[in-house]
Amino acid sequence: MRLTVNGEPQEVRASTLEALLAELDYEGSWLATARNGELVHAEDRGTCLLTEGDRIEILSPMQGG
């Protein structure tokens, strides 16, 4: 399936947001995720179904300032 992840086109096999994070080697409960501009809470990622063309944002906090 073709998605846009953090602004980059990706071809993935995952069908849920949780599976996508695993496929792309993202780990940690501190990640923030959004699907098509809508926040997806960590507890909902396993049931958040992905569809062709979805826009996914995966953000992690950065230190510094």
Image: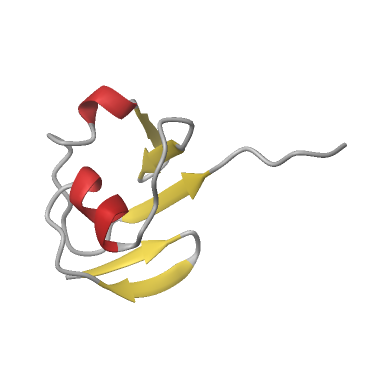
Residue depicted at x 36% and y 46%: 36
Residue 12, x across and y down, in percent = 22, 70
Q: Quadrant of residue 47?
A: top left
Count the marks. Answer: 0
Q: Which of 34/22 is in front?
A: 22
Residue 21, x across and y down, in percent = 31, 51
- Answer with left or right where residue 19 lies relative to residue 61: left
- Answer with left or right where residue 2 lies relative to residue 10: left
Residue 35, x across and y down, in percent = 34, 43
Q: Quadrant of the N terminus?
A: bottom left
Residue 55, x across and y down, in percent = 36, 55
Q: Quadrant of residue 53?
A: bottom left
Relative to 32, does residue 3 appear above or below in the rendering?
A: below
Residue depicted at x 36% and y 59%: 25
- Considering every residue shown, the one lying at the far right of the view is 65
Q: Quadrant of the C terminus?
A: top right
Q: Which of 60/1 is in front?
A: 60
Relative to 44, does residue 35 appear above or below in the rendering?
A: below
Residue depicted at x 46% and y 48%: 58
- Answer with left or right where residue 65 lies relative to residue 21: right
Colour scheme: secondary structure
Residue depicted at x 83% and y 39%: 64
